[in-house]
Amino acid sequence: MLRLRHVSVGVVLALVVSSAVMPLARAADQPGEPCSTEGFIQNLGTGFLVCTNGVWQASSTAPPPPLGTPSAGAGSTAKVAKIFKPVGTALSQDTFGSTGKQVADATAFRLPDGRVRILAFVNVTTGLPGLRSATSTTKAGTSFVSDGTDPFPGTPVGQPRAFPLGGNSLRLFFAEAGTVQTAVSSDGGVTFTRQGPVITTEQAGFEPGVISVIKHKGVYRAYFSNLEKPGVHAERVMRTATSSDLMTWTMGPSVVAAGGSHPFAVTDKTGKVALYYAADRGSTYGIWVSTSKDGINFSKEKLVVVGGGDADIIRAASGGGYLMYYGADLGGNNFGIKVAKSIGKVIP
């Protein structure tokens, strides 16, 4: 989940999997006033309020840098990778006729007709927040309209990741109740049949966020991080696992020494892997990328997008490039999904 301020990485998903799905907070007049929903966030001048133990508490932690084309800033040692160029907003609350100000954790896949379908967490104005779908108006995959469907009615699941199986079929991984769950669809993501948990907290050694899966050197390899929770400053850990059938997973080691959240993996014919993830590096928060030849040991970290998070990448319809969908602050405390087009090597 895109960080909504320094202490609130993954607020929406953390609330989802703890069975308390909630929108951003309504305005609070002063710190110290009572609040009803743990983890809610409200801007407060240069800082923000967070609902903690039933009371609005102020924090002066600086907000993340402005969103957009990466710039490490004066005095930063971060290397910048010119891989993606933002081209616009793909999804917002307006896409779904909502005033909930939260659309997040998008996963994208192509339909047989070439259009792109996105599943994302939506904090709807009425009804239960959860996954909703939208489909692009063209094969370009930059403009979307809501499908008006709820793939998991009555269930507030979060952090979806689609793994296409060909045609209209796909497997979806998602986070729910301390586990990574999976379900399959044969109608392009309109309806799903659950197939149960695939990675539990006990297996992972921590409460897992959802997995990103690639086919790598003859096996399926997954990457995931510990689930972000509101108000919790936990060390970020990313881990890998392998499987032969996408259902039974063998836990592997941790990857990327510096840590990160909500990884997305891309590989090429040589087996080289690029891992995109959200991370803080000093004063810079955003999407970073590291590369590996063996899928385990990653290095050469570079900054890709300042302020963004939760990257999900698919191939462009033409030209051999890629599209990246990622969480971003759209302004006015309205969090949505932006889209960027590749201008460089996605596996640098």
Image (cartoon, grey):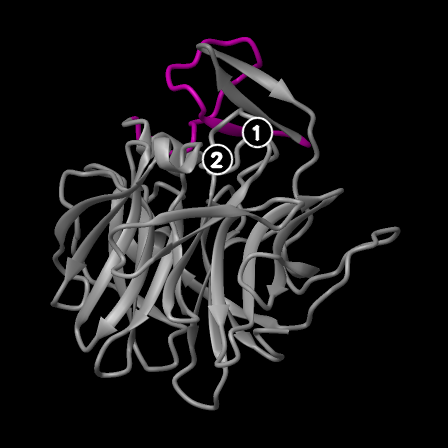
Whether residue 97 appears in this view of the structure is no
Whether residue 131 appears in this view of the structure is yes
Provide residue 221's location: percent of width, then percent of height: 41, 60
Is residue 23 located in the magenta-colored stretch of the structure?
yes
Which residues fall within the magenta stretch? 20-46
Q: Is residue 10 above or below residue 339?
A: above
Q: Amino acid at mark 1?
A: Ala
Return the residue at label 1.
234
Return the residue at label 2.
228
Q: Are marks 1 and 2 in contact (CB under 8 Å)?
A: yes
Identify the residue shown where x is 68% and y is 32%.
46
**Location of residue 232 (image quadrant):** top right
Identify the residue shown where x is 61% and y is 44%.
259
Instruction: Describe the element under mark 1 as helix, strand or loop.
Output: loop
Q: Which mark is residue 52?
A: none
**Location of residue 20 (image quadrant):** top left
Q: Is residue 85 above or below residue 320?
A: above
> Nearest the camera: 305 or 248?
248
The residue positioned farthest toward the right in the image shown: 75
Provide residue 100's location: percent of width, then percent of height: 35, 41
Left or right: residue 48 versus residue 24 is right
Identify the residue shown where x is 46% and y is 44%.
1
The mark nearer the N terminus, 1 or 2, is: 2
Q: Main secondary structure of the magenta part?
A: loop
